[in-house]
Amino acid sequence: MKVTAKDGRSRWKCLNIRSLRGKLLSLSLLLVAVILVVVGILQHIFMKQYTYQNKAESMLNQVISIPPETWRQGGLPIPKPEGADQMNASDQASDKRAQEVQDDDQSGEAGKFDEGEKTSSDAAGKRDRAPVPMLFLPGLTLAYVDQEGQYKTLSEWSDGGTAPRLSKAEIEEILLTNQYERKLSSNYMIVDNEQGEEQLVVFSPVPLRHPIGLVQISTATAPMKGELSRQLMIYIVLSLIALTAGSLVFMPLLRKTLQPLSNMVHTVEQINAGNLQQRLSVTEKQEEIDKLASSFNDMLERLEASFEAEKEAKEQMRQFIADASHELRTPLTSIHGFLEVLLRGASKHPEQLDRALKSMYGESERMNKLVHDLLLLAKLDRAPELTASEGKLGLMIDEMEPQLRLLAQQRKVSFDLDCEISCIYDRDKLKQVVLNLFYNAVQHTDPEAGKIKLSLKQHQHKWVQLQVQDNGIGIDDEHIPLLFNRFYRMDPSRARKHGGAGLGLSITKSIIDLHGGHIEVRSDLGSGTTFIVTLPLDQRQP
């Protein structure tokens, strides 16, 4: 199979300790290795203790299985049972009676009897002098230790080592302990013999209830240590094999598990300022990665919205500068033209001079109002200030009636006001809202047949609604969403004729937004337009 450079780089990334895959793999292997080491140490300690304890019990059981008569023949002070003494006394009495009966027989027979008795006595003596039986205990060394600490070797094997010798104090302590417990104990000791060989030693008291000596059983620990070392080496080899096999199996699983993260990185690398529409997959069926992808998608949406807002703001700023420049250039051009006319000699004619001065005055007023509106919008955008207080909005509008009728001239004006409604508002700013909306209605209604109606009423117990309705020419639906844009005019020539720059409705919306309200427009072409302003009764309510 051909291995490509891409596959090699992928494997290198998985083995790279600085990568997430490498860290997860190395930490997992390290954790498993630590667990295996701890388990191996504990297993070695427990196996060593179990092996020594089991060997001690086996040695003690082997010694216990030896008949007492064997120990007595070996010279150990083990008392005979009471039944055995009675049996010897009965045998002696029977022999005595048999001897008395034989004394009355014939001399030949007596001589024969004497010869038989001598033969029996020789056999008994030979039985008393019988050799000590051999103890077959491979690998073990047996010794008898009396209360004075004197050792007598009973059985010794070359692979078992020589019997280690304890001090008299240690012997007395062991005897005292066994006398107190009055039972056999498989507790063992690890001591070194005279050759420096480590020995496992077990003691059996003689006799059990009132011990006056000990049978010491010992064996070398080297074979047991060798077996434990072999088991430990086998465990280490198997652990290394398990770690190697585990890493080989874990690497592809880890690569598959982290594949969604790699896909996420690949997708993110393709995203830039000009390509914020791309989104990450949130259906990888991995909770953490799906949450990360969802959070990243939310961030992309906010960035996209921010870029769009910035783009729109730049476009609005560009359009605003262009419109403001155009609006300022028009009166300046007009004033400049009149000045040129005056310089050419028109100033010597009173009628031409008067007309030129009036025109320049009107253009200067228009330019002054434009600059004032621009400053007001900048102030509302930068650091809006609201001096709000509780009052009756209907009474404020009612006080403005003479001013509004003066602006309406021949148009019919009607009022439907609930003067008892109280709300929190900025008096000066809402006066400007009413004037802007009313002046807009005046501009778009007929001077003779025009009708304008102002109404104020409570809405849903939480709001107050101000409506400015006229019977003017109406507004086309395509213009309604753009009415509150700065410098927007449906009919530029008509607005300029009346001195408007397209900032009044924009200022109105900014003031209403500052009060926490909203404004909407309803219009029918040829029937009129209604501006509806909705304000909260209390600005603290949601």
Image: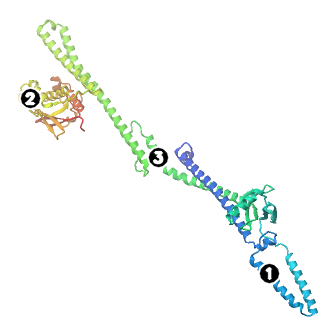
Image spot of residue 182 (x, y percent):
68, 66
Q: Nearer the viewer, mark 3 or mark 2?
A: 3
In the picture shown, does residue 85 fall above or below 196? below
Position of 295 with respect to 12 (left or right) is left
Q: Earlier in the sequence, mark 1 or mark 2?
A: 1
- Position of the C terminus by quadrant: top left
Give 271 or 469, whichever is nearer the viewer. Answer: 469
Whether tag 1 and tag 3 are in contact, CB under 8 A, the answer is: no
Q: CA distance from mark 3 to mark 2?
A: 69 Å
Residue under pointer 2: 446
Residue at horizontal 30%, vertical 30%?
315
Residue at horizontal 73%, vertical 63%?
203
- Secondary structure of the residue carrying tag 2 is loop
Residue under pointer 1: 89
Q: Residues within 10 Å of mark 2 (few under 14, many from 20)?
A: some
Give 151 or 55, whichever is nearer the viewer. Answer: 151
Residue type at numbered disc 1:
Ala
Residue 124 seen in this snapshot? yes
In the picture shown, does residue 165 fall above or below 484? below
Residue type at numbered disc 2:
Asp
Q: Residues within 10 Å of mark 3 (few under 14, many from 20)?
A: some
Image spot of residue 317 (x, y percent):
30, 27
Q: CA distance from mark 1 to mark 2?
A: 160 Å
Residue type at numbered disc 3:
Leu
What colour scheme governs how the chains and residues are painted in the rendered image of this protein?
rainbow
Q: Nearer the viewer, mark 1 or mark 3?
A: 1
Image spot of residue 430 (x, y percent):
18, 28
Q: Which mark is residue 261?
A: 3
